[in-house]
Image (cartoon, coloured by chain):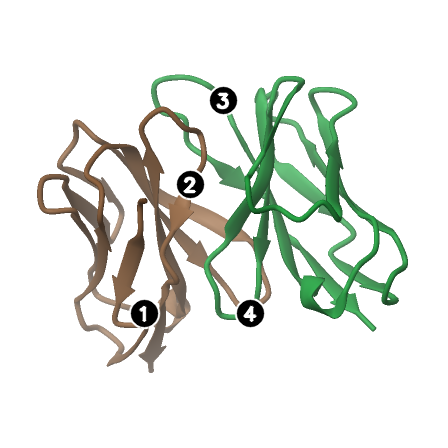
Chain colours: A brown, B green
């Protein structure tokens, strides 16, 4: 059974810092992995999607990596800003299924 | 802009009173999903439609039903809401292609009194 874990559960950093959020999954047989952002009381915004054949994806100040063999993904945020404060969720799509399995998220606070 | 729309954004119902949540999409995606997210927890898939084919998760309570009358609309019916059903309900869509990225709506926050 696929399980997704995100550590730490919460993170507080000063503005301007570069930071890394971690995601691990137990079964490497995945189709893809998505990183989402969720603001309080809101829906999910897709940030990056990495296919199982890819190693990383970049969008602006965000860079996501995938190491399928070790069951790990990281989301790197460069030059963090207060507007980056949100909960970040990673989700894997196992092979042969359309469903996403989510981690519980990392709640990020960037202090001015 | 193509998007996933959920109505209402906030829904209050009474214990045991049936309630329907609505999702519509302009993306013309053939797959639509309903997730339940309780406070500080990960979203949990309830069921999904692949075109008209309904796929229920094994642990989704019978109290939860869904309808998809056409490609654009999908409804979540909760027949007899209990206090434990209070949650954020998220609708998502995807297209069956090589990428299969899921796009989420803003969610409906359900309160059960």
* Residue ID for mark 2: A100
In this image, A46 relative to B31: left or right?
A: left
SS assignment at label 4:
loop
* Residue ID for mark 1: A81
* Residue ID for mark 3: B95
Q: Are marks 3 and 2 on the same chain?
A: no
Q: Nearer the viewer, mark 1 or mark 2?
A: 2
B65 and B36: which one is in front? B65
Q: Earlier in the sequence, mark 4 or mark 3?
A: 4
Q: Position of residue A33 (x, y in %)?
A: 30, 40
In this image, B26 relative to B57: left or right?
A: right
Where B96 sits versus A84, above or below? above
Q: Quadrant of the C terminus of chain B?
A: bottom right
| Residue B64, image quadrant | top right
* Residue ID for mark 4: B39
Q: Nearer the viewer, mark 4 or mark 3?
A: 4
Q: Indicate the chain on which mark 1 is placed.
A: A
In this image, B18 relative to A70: left or right?
A: right
């Amino acid at each position: 059974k696929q399980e997704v874990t995100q550590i730490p559960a919460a993170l507080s950093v000063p503005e301007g810092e570069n930071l890394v959020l971690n995601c691990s999954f137990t079964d490497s047989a995945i189709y893809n992995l998505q990183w989402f952002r969720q603001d309080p009381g809101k829906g999910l915004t897709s940030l990056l999607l990495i296919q199982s054949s890819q190693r990383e994806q970049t969008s602006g100040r965000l860079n996501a990596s995938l190491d399928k063999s070790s069951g790990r993904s990281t989301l790197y945020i460069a030059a963090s800003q207060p507007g980056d404060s949100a909960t970040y969720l990673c989700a894997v799509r196992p092979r042969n299924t359309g469903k996403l399995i989510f981690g519980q998220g990392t709640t990020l606070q960037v202090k001015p | 802009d193509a998007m996933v729309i959920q109505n209402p954004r906030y829904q209050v119902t009474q214990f045991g009173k049936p309630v329907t949540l609505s999702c519509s999409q302009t993306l013309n995606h053939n797959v639509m999903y309903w997730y339940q997210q309780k406070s500080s927890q990960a979203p949990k898939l309830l069921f999904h439609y692949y075109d008209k084919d309904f796929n229920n998760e094994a642990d989704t309570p019978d109290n939860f039903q869904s309808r998809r009358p056409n490609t654009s609309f999908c409804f979540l019916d909760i027949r007899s809401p209990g206090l434990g059903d209070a949650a954020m309900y998220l609708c998502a869509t995807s297209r069956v292609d090589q990428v299969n990225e899921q796009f989420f709506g803003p969610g409906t926050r359900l309160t059960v009194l």
